[in-house]
């Protein structure tokens, strides 16, 4: 078939564009377009090559998996190629894949969004680790892989193969990714676009000690060369063997029959995607029977017996219409991009954070720019990068304000901090609004009915200048506000009165000391009265477990301000109180234990369970780590349960927890 010159030119342009994107994605770890746009480009090329087979060239992106390894690393040739999967972007394409497998057993698993690696074990010892590279050879990252605690240096047991190649994914959990970016921002260093980039950049460090400082993890999902052991003939049984040999596998996989079961799995995983501890970009369906896999074989260097069913993109491209500065509770100035509305992961996004002054300058974000927006690993959308080739000609660099845009006070920036702050304090209406919202929140003073819109009106009308003014409000003042009837006003007054009886931990959290969250507030309440806390020195604070020098400095600085001392005294005078010793640990039976609560409890709230455990000396945290000693799993426990199982942490149910608490009564 003769190929029209227009088609030849179109294919050549697509090959060049995709190869450029491959370089930035795989080699430089700096993707220039969202995955969704890349997938569309590749699909367009594949469609052309399918229609005109003579278009296919040896260097076509459709004929390879990734990009060549960096010269900085030695190369390792894969004994069995690490080939990629074909993608399904909708239900119809998934159904087309499985149309001949009506009653076939599938193994459905998560498609991790990290960096694919191959681990080689000889006589049970880890001898090499390589990235996927171009599918046939990859980068030697052995020294770095050995720093990842979830990768065993020696296999467990005695019946493992003499040679075992394990394929899997190195990834960075979302919680650690967010903490890493916070540290990077505080240092004025590069912010990673997403957990996948953070994992890739961390694993491909030339200095393994840098990798060792990054919280990477690993899941295995397949094998390459295996010598000395006869493997089972079902994929799920192979994974069970890997787990027996000490290699972590995901607990979120399922055995299913037919495509209908696979699609239900897809829908279920999509719903809980944001709750998972790590990023995924889809699910994978594999024919479970290895004999059938062999019979089906491969097409275009991808297996016929597996497919990746991709999720809707968590990145999108849009344009910045304006840049505003928002002022937070602690005075932090955050630049926010106002966007042309765009749908990202099923949500229409109109605003996105630019993090801070340094980050905005590093990315050189300007009004009028076309940018990539992401929601991956974070609820708040963020501007990830600028598409410079689409920048209008007469744009100007954004000038960060020297005065607060709300109150006009000077903007100051402490040496060593990335965040600029308004110096106006409670005089600044923006800070006052955020402080009041925090003070009234459920986990602080828990003032029912005092929502964001009501707070806005109270501040805008100068009805609340100081925190204590909140408790001086009258029904008449409240009924003068929009959408506030007499009954609603009376309910607010009742809620304010009820909130006066609280705990010291809640009160400390509510007054809004920088870096003092719930857990830290509870620790402080266990060791100080409010009077002792106000007088505590930095050294006295640092003698308390989990109170570091930065938090201690913020606490001391807070109580050095006379306005804060006066506010606390006024609140106590007007009636805010808490039982003496209400947060003091009387029984220290669980002083060495670290608990995590997950799922729904039926006989008590998680807050009640947390309080009872802390009263016995236990520490209760929000995330599972190797320091966790026990996980309490209620109904519908999710990713925290999976992680605890992976780490071998003790797991109990609600009945076990109740029995434990009763045993110390």
Image: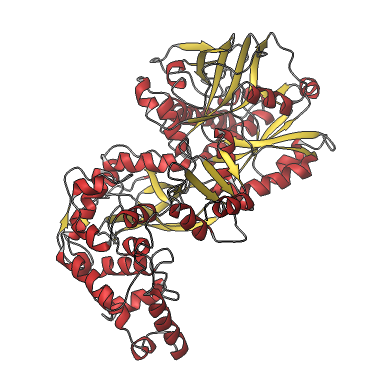
What is the quadrant of residue 310 in the picture?
A: top right
Q: Is residue 284 visible?
A: no
> Residue at coordinates 22% horizontally, 45% vertically from top-left?
417
Q: State whether residue 369 is above or below residue 456.
A: above
Q: Position of residue 343 (x, y in %)?
A: 52, 54
Report the quarter where the N terminus lies. top right
Foreground: 447 or 270? 447
Q: Is residue 647 visible?
A: yes
The image quarter containing residue 423 is bottom left
For the point 67% across and 49% down, the residue is: 267
- Say whether residue 69 is left or right of residue 166: left
Please say if 144 is above or below 181: above
Number of marks drawn? 0
Image location of residue 60, percent across then percent down:
56, 23
Which residue is found at the position 76% from the left and 34% from the top?
106
Horizontal side of residue 233 vs 387, given as left or right: right
Residue 369, compared with residue 127, is above or below; it is below
């Amino acid at each position: 078939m003769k190929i029209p010159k227009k088609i030849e030119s179109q294919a050549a342009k697509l090959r060049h564009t995709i190869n450029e994107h491959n370089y930035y994605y795989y080699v430089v770890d700096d993707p220039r377009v969202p995955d969704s746009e890349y997938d569309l480009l590749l699909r367009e090329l594949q469609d052309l090559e399918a229609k005109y087979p003579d278009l296919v060239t040896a260097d076509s992106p459709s004929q390879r998996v990734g990009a060549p390894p960096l010269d900085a690393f030695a190369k390792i040739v894969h004994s069995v190629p690490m080939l990629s999967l074909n993608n399904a972007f909708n239900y119809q394409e998934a159904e087309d894949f499985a149309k001949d497998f009506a009653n076939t057993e599938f193994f459905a698993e998560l498609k991790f969004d990290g960096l694919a690696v191959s681990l080689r074990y000889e006589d049970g010892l880890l001898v090499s680790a390589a990235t996927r590279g171009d599918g046939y050879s990859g980068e030697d990252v052995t020294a770095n892989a050995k720093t990842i605690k979830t990768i065993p240096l020696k296999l467990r047991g005695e019946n493992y193969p003499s040679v075992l190649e394990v394929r899997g994914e190195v990834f960075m959990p979302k919680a650690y990714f967010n903490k890493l970016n916070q540290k990077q921002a505080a240092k004025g260093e590069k912010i990673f676009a997403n957990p996948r980039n953070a994992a890739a950049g961390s694993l491909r460090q030339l200095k393994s000690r840098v990798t060792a400082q990054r919280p990477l993890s690993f899941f295995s999902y397949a094998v390459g060369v295996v010598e000395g052991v006869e493997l089972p003939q079902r994929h799920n049984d192979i994974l069970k063997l890997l787990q027996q040999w000490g290699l972590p596998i995901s607990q979120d996989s399922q055995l299913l029959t037919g495509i209908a079961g696979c699609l239900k799995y897809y829908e279920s995983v999509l719903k809980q995607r944001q709750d998972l501890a790590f990023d995924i970009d889809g699910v994978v369906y594999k024919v479970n029977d290895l004999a059938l896999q062999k019979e089906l074989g491969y097409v275009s260097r991808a297996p016929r017996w597996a497919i990746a069913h991709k999720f809707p993109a968590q990145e999108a491209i849009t344009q910045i219409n304006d840049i505003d500065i928002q002022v937070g509770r602690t005075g932090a100035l955050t630049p926010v991009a106002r966007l042309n509305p765009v749908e990202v992961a099923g949500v229409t996004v109109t605003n996105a954070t630019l993090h801070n002054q340094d980050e905005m300058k590093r990315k050189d974000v300007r009004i009028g720019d076309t940018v990539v927006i992401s929601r991956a690993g974070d609820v708040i959308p963020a501007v990830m990068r600028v598409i410079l080739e689409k920048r209008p000609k007469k744009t100007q660099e954004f000038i960060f304000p020297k005065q607060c845009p709300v109150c006009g006070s000077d903007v100051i920036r402490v040496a060593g901090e990335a965040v600029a702050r308004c110096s106006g304090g409670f005089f600044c209406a923006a800070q006052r609004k955020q402080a009041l919202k925090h003070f009234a929140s459920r986990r602080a003073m828990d003032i029912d009915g005092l929502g964001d819109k009501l707070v806005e009106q109270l501040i805008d009308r100068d009805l609340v200048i100081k925190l204590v003014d909140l408790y001086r409000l009258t029904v008449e003042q409240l009924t003068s506000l929009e959408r506030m009837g007499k009954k609603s006003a009376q309910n607010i007054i009742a809620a304010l009165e009820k909130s006066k009886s609280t705990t010291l931990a809640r009160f400390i959290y509510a007054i809004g000391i920088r870096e003092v969250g719930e857990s830290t507030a509870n620790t402080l309440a266990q060791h100080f009265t409010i009077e002792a806390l106000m007088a505590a020195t930095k050294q006295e604070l640092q003698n308390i477990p989990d109170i570091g020098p930065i938090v201690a400095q913020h606490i001391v600085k807070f109580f050095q301000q006379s306005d804060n001392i006066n506010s606390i005294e006024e609140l106590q005078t007007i009636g805010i109180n808490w039982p003496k010793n209400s947060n003091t640990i009387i029984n220290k039976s669980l002083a060495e234990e670290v608990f995590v609560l997950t799922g729904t409890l039926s006989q008590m709230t998680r807050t009640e369970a947390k309080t009872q455990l802390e009263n016995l000396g236990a520490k209760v945290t929000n995330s599972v780590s190797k320091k966790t000693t026990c996980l309490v799993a209620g109904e519908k426990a999710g990713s925290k349960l999976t992680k605890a199982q992976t780490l071998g942490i003790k797991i109990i149910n609600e009945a076990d927890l109740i029995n434990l608490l009763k045993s110390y009564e």
